[in-house]
Image: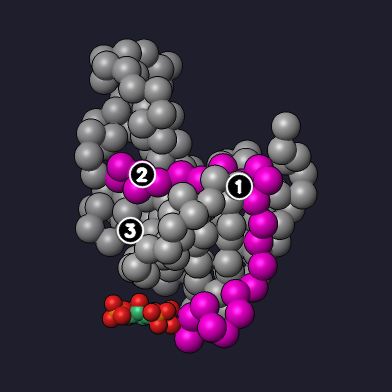
Amino acid sequence: SSSSPKSPSSPSEKCGVLNVTKITENGKKVRKNWTSSWTVLQGSSLLFAKGQGSGTTWSYYRSGSIPELLLTLLANWKRSIKPRPAVAFGHSVNGRAQAATKFGTNQSKPEFTVDLRGGSVDWASKDKSSKKRVIELKTRQGTELLIQSEIDSVINDWYRALTDTISTHAWE
Ligand code: I3S
């Protein structure tokens, strides 16, 4: 199909494909490595998962099943922060979480997550990247990311969502 799937409209739950690179990790400069990543904003957490190469994730995207995709990514993420036996994950009421369990084994494993609380977001200055429309995200933990999309409206929406999230989720 030629029409792209819509992202969930809630400001604190958003997902999409973005180009992402870390530039600093734990306060230390790291080499840029731009990759296309599934990006999920949920509450004050921002999750990145592998883009191309994870066949299941892309088939969800192509079929427009963003809710399925979001569910899978969130399930995988929760699993990654609270490791538990795969069996324990199959207790859900419908078939979806079963699927998430199956896909969660390796195919759309999150690459990393960041906590937005206490972080900052700004448009990156030209010395940070030659690319246009680049967001610079700094976390409280000393990670700096560059986030980019070729699509104006996409990156503008993310900019708004990230700034809204940072201003509404105070650091406690
Ligand atoms: O900030 P830099 O070092 O100019 O970033 C560029 C490099 O990471 C480059 O990779 P290698 O130096 O490993 O070949 C990337 O291909 C570029 O995309 C990086 O610059 P941009 O301006 O695209 O962020």
Element type where label 3 sits in the image: loop
- At a point 50% along the width and 67% down the height, the residue shown is 146
Tell me the distance, in whole angstroms, between the alpha carbons under discs 3 and 1: 26 Å
* Residue 73 seen in this snapshot: yes
Q: Say which quarter of the image contains residue 107.
A: top left
Circle 1 packing at 10 Å, graded few (<14), some (14-19), many (20+), is: some
99 to the left or right of 133: left
Is ligand 1 less than 8 Å from the beta carbon at label 3?
no
Q: Is residue 121 magenta?
A: yes
Mark 2–mark 3 CB contact (< 8 Å): no
Of marks 2 and 3, which one's residue comes earlier in the chain?
Answer: 3
The figure's colour scheme reads: one colour
Instruction: Locate residue 25, reporting x and y percent.
Output: 44, 54
Q: Of tags 1 and 2, which is closer to the observer?
A: 1
* Identity, as a three-letter code, of the amino acid under mark 3: Gly
Q: Which mark is residue 110?
A: 2
- At a point 40% along the width and 46% down the height, the residue shown is 112
47 to the left or right of 89: right
- At a point 23% along the width and 34% down the height, the residue shown is 105
Of marks 3 and 1, which one's residue comes earlier in the chain?
Answer: 3
75 to the left or right of 120: left
Circle 2 packing at 10 Å, graded few (<14), some (14-19), many (20+), is: many
* Identity, as a three-letter code, of the amino acid under mark 1: Arg
- Residue identified by numbered label 3: 51
- Which is nearer the eye, 143 or 117? 143
Instruction: Locate residue 7, reporting x and y percent.
Output: 56, 55
Residue bounds of the magenta highlight: 108-132
- Residue identified by numbered label 1: 140
Q: Of tags 3 and 1, which is closer to the observer?
A: 1
Whether residue 155 is situated above or below residue 84 in the rendered picture: below
